[in-house]
Image (tube, grey):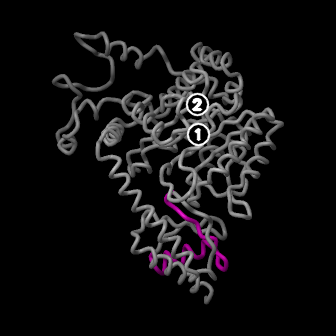
Amino acid sequence: MNPLAVQLNQSIQENNGHVYEMLSQLGKEIYFPKEGILSQSAEAGKLAQKYNATIGIATEAGGPMHLGVIHDKLSAFKPKDLYPYAPPAGKPELRAAWREKMLKENPALEHKSFGNPIVTNALTHGLSIVADLFVEEGDAVIYPDKNWENYELTFSIRRHARLVNFPLFTEQMTFNSQGLREALLAQKDTGKAIVILNFPNNPTGYTPGASEGEEIVAAIRDAAEAGINVVVVTDDAYFGLFFEDSLQESLFGKLVSLHPRVLAVKVDGATKEEYVWGFRVGFITYASESGEVLSALEQKTLGIIRATISSGPHPSQTFVLEALKSPAFEQQKAEKFAIMKGRANTVKALLDSGKYDDAWDYYPFNSGYFMCLKLKTVNAEALRTHLLQQYGVGTIALGDQDLRIAFSCIEEESLEDLYNLIYQGVQDLLKS
């Protein structure tokens, strides 16, 4: 094993041996090179006053070489903020701005010990970093039965995890914290689990309330006290889009410093929060009482980044940073939030009108981009196909009964027509 990896592992072991036990074999072996092209280039950047012939970019007239046909469209930005490689951890100014945003939007993080956000190539990349660092073949990865299908590719297919699902909702249609507790305690023999908490939830659009949040935290604490090492990942892809009386903060704040056997990891990003899906700017943030553990996990994360994408795209990091710094940012976000909330409220009013009650129920939703119908009389895939072919309406079928509707991409005035067409599709299938 490389001496740098050994040194990082020793630092983690000395400051929290439970976190060391959470690491996969890859997680133990990975490191960020301190000697090599990047480190030598960084040193040259500070000291090479005459000629800097280190990093693999082309320069011209004292700045990065670039094409006019590209920069003509980007002339509002300085070439140095677009064309050179971004640091593997991301632009320092962006990392600082995102941390400040996290603290502002999550008061529970005040005075808590957590690291500086590391820039990822959006949220999927952040989740895959978690998988690489902490998931060994056969490890239990726990999340609800209503979930984003990419978890299976990320954790099961790529890392051969053992997926453990539990029902998202109780019979009372609240978050099934007891199901989470049972799934966790079932891992007592192996002593390790990775938990994914995705709120607002994809596909249902559900975020738990405050008491449910406390129950979730208690279930994780109980598992830790039972001797289970728990990596808890808050997948906060749709953070901030809370339309009703639910948790208004990420559970990450409650999980920080919860127990020595709990490692809290926050994965979030500008992707959906700031409506910049194609920019691919996300973040991964670790929490630990130990600065040494945080530093070691950051170095290992940079090793994964260096070994996979090398670094994230520079232009989109600059665009997001400029947005965060803009005086108009908060007002414009509030305007988009109002549009999204209006759509969610309209959908709920339509569904509560009673006109569709013979065709479906719906799962609780109070946040995010989506809601999910629970069909009573027809198969979800049959309905999806029929709607697409007969009415030009696209929906997502999940299993036999569930149909996901993304109200995020439908204008408010068109929502009633959409649900009427879905209802008509059900009637068509019943007649056929």
Label 1 vs 2, first from the N-terminus:
1
Vertical comparison of 35 with 95: above or below: above
**Which residue occupies the foreground of this view, 307 or 148?**
148
**Residue pointed to by mark 1:** 252
**Which residue occupies the foreground of this view, 334 or 347?**
334
**Which residue occupies the foreground of this view, 201 or 45?**
201
Residue farthest to the bottom, as pictured: 431
Side of 399 relative to 235 (left or right): right
Vertical comparison of 135 with 425: above or below: above
Q: Amino acid at mark 1?
A: Phe
Q: Amino acid at mark 2?
A: Ala
x then y, percent, for residue 214 = 67, 46
- Residue 217 lies in magenta, yes or no? no
Spatial separation of the CA atoms under disc 1 and disc 2:
9 Å
Q: Residues within 10 Å of mark 2 (few under 14, many from 20)?
A: many
Q: Which quadrant holds the N terminus?
A: top right
Q: Do the CB atoms of the residues marked 1 and 2 lie less than 8 Å apart?
A: yes
Q: Is disc 1 placed on a helix, strand or loop?
A: helix
Picture residue at 68% right of the left edge, 42% below the top: 217
Q: Is disc 2 placed on a helix, strand or loop?
A: loop
x then y, percent, for residue 363 = 62, 66
The magenta-colored residue range is 368-392
Name the disc covering residue 138, or none: none
Side of 221 relative to 417 (left or right): right
Name the disc covering residue 287, or none: 2
Q: Residues within 10 Å of mark 1 (few under 14, many from 20)?
A: many
x then y, percent, for residue 128 = 56, 40
**Which residue occupies the foreground of this view, 356 or 423?**
356
x then y, percent, for residue 126 = 52, 39
Picture residue at 39% right of the left edge, 74% below the top: 413
Q: Which quadrant holds the C terminus?
A: bottom right
